[in-house]
Image (tube, rainbow, N blue to C red):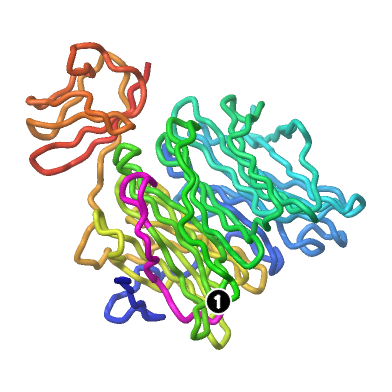
Amino acid sequence: MILVISLLLIAQGVDSRWDSPDILIEDSLGSYVDFAVDYNYSNGNIYVACIPDSGTYFGPENCWGLLLFRSTDHGLSWDLLHSEIFALGCLGKGIDLVVTRSDTVYVIFSYYVKGDNDDEIGLEKIYEGEGGTWERDWIPLIPNIRVPEIRSPKLVRDDFDDFYLYMSYLTINPDRDSLIILRSTDRGKNWSRLLRASSAAEWQDHDITVSDSSIYHLSTFQSGDNQTLQVTYWRDRGIPVDVINLQEINTNEAGQIRYPRIGATTTLPDSGQLVYAFFSQENPGGGNDLLYQYSQNGGADWDSIPDTLADESYSPVLCDLRGYQAAPNQWMDITYCFTSSAPSFENFWCWSSEGEPTNWQGTTSVGTGANRSVPELIYSPGAPGGGGAVVFNDSLGNLWFDAPWYSGISENTDIIKKKISSKIVPAGSTVEVGSAGAIVYDVTGRVIKILNTNSWDLKDGEGKEVEGGIYFIVEKENGNRTKLSILK
């Protein structure tokens, strides 16, 4: 049985939490601007990197470059930190970025080299130098990546103190396409291969996310008349586990799968994480649907039939999703946009409730006018309200920020997201527990110790000090969880 969640274009009976005026980040960027967002979990600073539309923003014809903006007040105001003009003989394409706890920004972007008729990848580290000036280091990739087409460069990182970076992209060649996933354990200096999948099949699109020590990747590829939606995942920051084909369709009989996006929650041990795979597909009656499948045990098993979040869109539905990070929690926020029959663009935001993967709450319109891009979802810990904010561009080349916390309207849903504490403690500490009786797990789901008191001395059941890393304390009485990072 397919559980279909019917969503109206404008949520009826729910006051908008997004009714404040949108905040302009930058204008005159061009209608084809590419952008990406991320935030510093430690201080709530938000960063937006973008490649303006060629030939408009930087003045000279066919000139392109990179811009980096930052907000230190949860999106209310924005500063341009870094502006960089690149060669006239190139054209910027895709972009992504990650931000570290020290406000260091890593930006990946692909660009077309006109003279060589090839695509290349650039990777930069942008940081605040002495005297408050922002500097950048170009990080060379060995070997240099140059192919006829590079599609959808992605960059993510885990949240450990010695964080790893993960890069993924598609290379499109006349006779052989490839999916490449790389990992850096030394902050971008060197890269090793987690996966290289090459075949005569046509790789179409992909997405990657990291949750605690697990890496999840979702991709689509076409072989003859058959198209496959595939999940690959790793544990322990890069140990391969499994490859699962979620959907295998004949494109002569079914609409193509487009825009795969994957997201995972973060509060449970990796083996218990809730993982979502979203994709857009043309339906037999016309229009397009936003469909999803989910796993409640960290990617090992998936519901076999897709559920529907939005249907009968005029165009393919674009979406962005992230596990709720305002405090580590087992919720999934999603923002999505589609073209109505007008056509005009409609953007929506909603979130799923804990333990009920198909129960989506708070469906809210966040405005119209987004052009050729999905509003990217972002958080800002410490903001004066919960939920995620979005960054989106319009058809006039303006880049906007929109958030629910400036509206002054409280979250008006029957289910409130419970904050779950996240603590960082040094080895040798004692951690207070909210109630007597709790179970301590490591990131693999293994029971480390059963507590019968209101504290944990960071020792396992045999009295040995545990290793540094991430642990979870689940209280028996009320189910409250604490995500604990132990430093050594």
Q: Is residue 209 visible?
A: no
Q: Quadrant of residue 91?
A: bottom right
Q: Residue at x 56, y 54 (%)?
A: 219
Q: Name the side, left or right, on which 416 lies relative to 156.
A: left
* Spot occupied by residue 126 in the image (x, y as percentages of width and height): 65, 37
| Residue labelled with disc 1 | 253
* Spot occupied by residue 74 in the image (x, y as percentages of width and height): 44, 51
Number of callouts in the render?
Answer: 1
Q: Residue furthest right?
A: 115
Q: Is residue 474 above or below residue 115?
A: above
Q: Residue at x 51, y 32 (%)?
A: 102
Q: Quadrant of residue 463?
A: top left
Residue placed most toward the observer, 210 or 132: 210
Q: Is residue 366 above or below residue 93?
A: below
Residue placed most toward the observer, 237 or 319: 237
* Spot occupied by residue 10 in the image (x, y as percentages of width and height): 38, 80
Quick check: is 313 in the magenta stretch?
yes
Q: Residue at x 23, y 19 (%)?
A: 458
Q: Residue at x 65, y 30 (%)?
A: 191
Given the image, on which type of amino acid does mark 1 rest? Glu
Specify start and end residues of the magenta stretch as a single range: 294-315
* Spot occupied by residue 136 in the image (x, y as percentages of width and height): 70, 35
